[in-house]
Amino acid sequence: MSATLPRRGLRFRFAMAIALVTAALEIAALFGLADYRLVFHNPIGAPWQDPAYRFDADLLFRRPAHQTVTGSSYGDIARRFRVPGAQPYDFEMRFDANGFRNPVDHVQADVVLVGDAFVEAGLVAVEDHVATRLGAARGETVVSLGSTGYGPQQQLVLVRDYAIPLAPHTIVWLFFEGDDLLDIPTFDSLHADRRREHGRVPWWDRSFARNALVRLTTSVGSRPTATDRSGVVRAGTGDERTYFLYTTPGLGPFEEQMLERLRDMLADAWALAEPRHVGLLVAYVPVKYRVYRDRLVESGPVAATWTTNDLPARIERMVHAISPDIGFIDLTPAFQEALDASAPPWFPDDSHWNGAGHRVAAFAIGQAIHAMLFPTGS
């Protein structure tokens, strides 16, 4: 009996100590002194809740003005799946007064690129960026307007509020087939959330208990391996194992509805550009799998089941139905030719272009702009 009481007392004191530590951790979250989403590296809900961004009434989120961000990051496929031997990439990004990835502020531009992560291109050095290469090739000022996570609604805002005021001769709208159609309803949902939250992060989202539980369940849960979604691609420089995040989207009733909404947004962009004598070029950004599919000498069990669709041709018809004066370029052939001749234009464990890919995109877009400006081939 005498030995039992001390053990009970120890258990009680231990429980009290745990409760006090937990309370202190939660008080830190309650008063904004700690954000355990970041401590546990958990997914962050609404983008404006991410400390790396600021709330914006129209765009919902954007980078802080004149921010410089440096560090290292794994590729998005390596982060989501288990990529054997993955190594982080060092990066440095500088943002302008509006929170977009431009080394300096601009009040005028010749060409403006609008889009998502392919325009922000966090893992690519600024000297390799499509905007830098396109500007150097054309001897013009090219401004990059885009952010990771932006979809068509935000890209229309970029055209209206940021691109048009720069008075360019051409606006290039980069449409990414991987998730831009999905981004349309996502924006609708986020827009409803921001009305409720007004950009604030609820305490429970930052709390220790919630984020510890999320990390625990994520750690013990099963995930598909990256090898299932991989393949060995044959390039001009040799074979390379690469990993896929996106397949080409299915084209069912949902996609048909989203295509109609995309058409309306592109028509709105053209209505803004055409009266101001600004050209509009839609650049179709394919997923890596579309470009690599016919060059794969080996495929994982998941990737082996994927197929491709005719979405590039459908987008082209849609664009030209709005106006034959809107330019269109499908970047797929340019990337396939580059793949056959040289190194792969995508990072092996990321769904975005590497420096070689940006070089290919800049050259192809530059040719398309020239064809728009000089339609007789002069």
Image: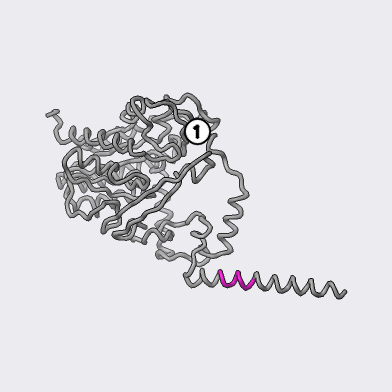
The answer to whether residue 251 is visible is no
The answer to whether residue 296 is visible is yes
Q: Give above or below for 94 relative to 335.
A: below
Q: Residue 72: give x, y in percent of width and height.
A: 42, 50
Q: Residues within 10 Å of mark 1 (few under 14, many from 20)?
A: many
Instruction: Tell me where residue 96 sits by quadrant.
Output: bottom left
Q: Residue 280: give x, y in percent of width and height.
A: 22, 41
Q: Quadrant of the N terminus?
A: bottom right
Is residue 26 found inside the magenta-colored segment of the image? no
Q: Residue at x 50, y 33 (%)?
A: 230
Q: Which residue is mark 1?
A: 230
Front-most of residues 197 and 341 = 341
Q: Amino acid at mark 1?
A: Ser
Q: Give above or below for 246 relative to 42.
A: above
Is residue 24 found inside the magenta-colored segment of the image? yes
Q: Secondary structure at mark 1?
A: strand
The number of numbered badges drawn on the structure is 1
The segment highlighted magenta reads: 19-25
Q: Residue at x 68, y 73 (%)?
A: 16
| In this rendering, position of residue 141 left or right of residue 87 | left
Front-most of residues 352 and 17 = 17
Q: Residue at x 54, y 72 (%)?
A: 27
| Secondary structure mainly formed by the magenta segment | helix
Q: Residue furthest left?
A: 378
Q: Give above or below for 35 relative to 221.
A: below
Front-most of residues 263 and 354 = 354
| In this rendering, position of residue 358 left or right of residue 200 | left
Q: Residue 132: give x, y in percent of width and height.
A: 25, 43
- The colour scheme used here is one colour
Q: Residue 169: give x, y in percent of width and height.
A: 16, 44
| In this rendering, position of residue 199 left or right of residue 277 | right
Q: Quadrant of the C terminus?
A: top left
